[in-house]
Each structure stands twice: as C-alpha cells, then as structure tokens.
Image (spheres, rainbow, N blue to C red):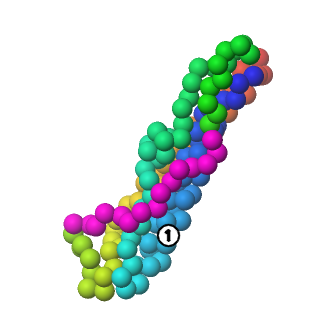
Amino acid sequence: MQPIQLFDLASRQAEWLSLRQEVVASNIANANTPKFAAKDITPFKAVLDSSQQIGMARTNPNHFASSDLGTDLNVDVRDAPLNDEIGKQVSGNSVSLSDEMVKMGEIQRQHQLNTSLVSSFNRMMLMTVKR
C-alpha cells in the first residue's frame, strides 16, 4: 500500500508553520533591540518546489522508482524586507510590530486550515474502512 501523500504534506506544512512562528516570535521579542533586523523564512511554496517531486505510483517492482519525499525542510531564514511605512527606526531596528502581528494571524489561519483538512480526510478514510 502506498503512503498517503496528504498526511506527509500536512506534516511538512506544520513543521514549516512552527519554524515561521519561532522566527516571528523572535522578531517580536527583539522589537526594542537596537540594530536588530527582522527575519522571515522561505515561503512554503518554495520549500515544496525545491524538495518535493511527486511521481507516479509504483505498482510493479519493474517500474522505475520515484523519488521519495524527504523529511528535511529546505528553509532559509533571511532578513525580512523593510516595511515602507516605518523603514529602519532611529535605533537601527527594522521590526514592525503590526507586520509581525499580521504574520501571526496568517500562521494561525494556515494551521487551522491544515488541521481541518487532515481531520476531514481522516474522517473520510475512516468512513471507507467502516463499510
């Protein structure tokens, strides 16, 4: 039986969301630190494009093997682009608390969507097994 790709994809996104939450929390914690540059991570789409190649299912041992999904996320933590409204503050800090709060809201919504999809898919699978 082939593994279900949706669960692996949801797991990868949950790892990515967790890492992004850590970076955003670090930005907020250092909002008053002089010369601190706000950070952000590689978008999830770029992580998928660089690490995931879903191929055809291998139904016969004589078929070419498809590449496996790796468990390592190829995530790069880099300086976030400057906010046009605030730019760099007098202290040299580039953290915009409003931007970081927006990012936290996005992370929360994406996490809720991720868990809702997995839960729905799990219920759907259990319904097919019960029959």
Q: Which quarter of the picture shows residue 85?
A: bottom left
Q: What kind of element bears circle 1?
A: helix
Q: Dividing the image into 4 quarters, which one contains the C terminus?
A: top right
On screen, residue 5 versus residue 36, left or right, reads right
Q: Is residue 102 visible?
A: yes
Q: Amino acid at mark 1?
A: Ala
Residue beneath the point at 56% across and 29% down: 54
The dominant secondary structure in magenta is loop
The answer to whether residue 51 is above or below residue 66 is below
Q: Which quarter of the picture shows residue 102?
A: bottom left
**Is 127 in the magenta?**
no
The answer to whether residue 11 is above or below residue 77 is above
On screen, residue 128 versus residue 86, left or right, reads right
**Is 72 in the magenta?**
yes
Residue beneath the point at 62% across and 25% down: 66
Most foreground residue, 128 or 63 = 63
Most foreground residue, 91 or 24 = 91
Residue 62: % across, % down: 71, 13
Q: Dividing the image into 4 quarters, which one contains the N terminus?
A: top right
Q: Is residue 111 visible?
A: no
Q: Which quarter of the picture shows residue 120?
A: top right
On screen, residue 17 versus residue 84, left or right, reads right
Q: Which residue is mark 1?
A: 25
Question: Within 10 angstroms of label 1, few (less than 14), some, or many (20 or more) residues?
Answer: some
Residue 51: % across, % down: 53, 41
Residue beneath the point at 46% across and 61% down: 77
- Looking at the image, which residue sits at the far left? 85
Which segment is the magenta one?
A: 70-84
Residue 93: % across, % down: 33, 79
